[in-house]
Image (cartoon, rainbow, N blue to C red):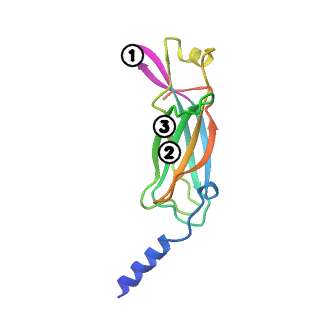
Amino acid sequence: MAALSSLLVVVSSACGPAVDLTKGLQVEVDKTGWYDAGIVNGQNKLVPLVSFHLRNVSGQRLPTLQVNALFRRVTEPDEWGSALVTAAGSSGLAPGATTEMLTVKSQLGYTGADPRQEMLKNSHFVDAKVELFAKYSSTQWVRIGVYPIARELITK
């Protein structure tokens, strides 16, 4: 009987009120920029990258917290690349806790024969932004921020 009551306490605490992630998560961006993805088909490749932490500023644990990053050129509405990362596994992110550094980069970017720094100065270069979406447990995806990608080179 004691095991059953313990189980009920755990189940009822997991079913607390839903957390609005736009208010319950704080995004702390460490850096954005253009990652040197090496040489692809004989050309230099740069892809947009963002590194950040998430802080749980809600009063509840956020189990299975995931982040989806959608990269877009600033002049286009269509997605240019994406990356999905698990910010906190089944044990969740406790109230007041901060994730480790999360780094995501697009699989798509720019390629060219110019040196990497020169690629960033090219007149045809179009800046990018990243939209971060988060969800925990079985909740729906919610946009938690939009950040410009700095026009600077990031190497390994």
Give the residue type at disc 2.
Asn
Q: Is residue 40 left or right of residue 109?
A: left
Magenta span: chief secondary structure: strand
Q: Which residue is mark 3?
A: 82
| Residue 145 percent across, percent down from the top left | 62, 45
Q: Is residue 101 left or right of residue 10?
A: right
Front residue of 20 and 9: 20
Give the residue type at disc 3.
Ser
Q: Which residue is mark 2?
A: 68
Residue at 47% over, 70% down: 14
Task: Label 2, secondary structure: give it.
Answer: strand
Structural crowding at the residue carrying mark 2, measured as other residues with C-alpha within 10 Å and reported as few (<14), some (14–19) or many (≥20): many
Q: Is residue 71 above or below residue 155?
A: below
Q: Is residue 42 a member of the stretch shown in magenta?
A: yes
Task: Label 3, secondary structure: give it.
Answer: strand
Q: Are marks 3 and 2 in contact (CB under 8 Å)?
A: yes
Q: How many marks?
A: 3
Q: Which residue is mark 1?
A: 41
| Label located before the other in sequence (1 or 3) | 1
Q: CA distance from mark 3 to mark 2?
A: 7 Å
Residues drawn in magenta: 34-46
Residue 29 is tagged as none
Q: Are marks 1 and 3 in contact (CB under 8 Å)?
A: no
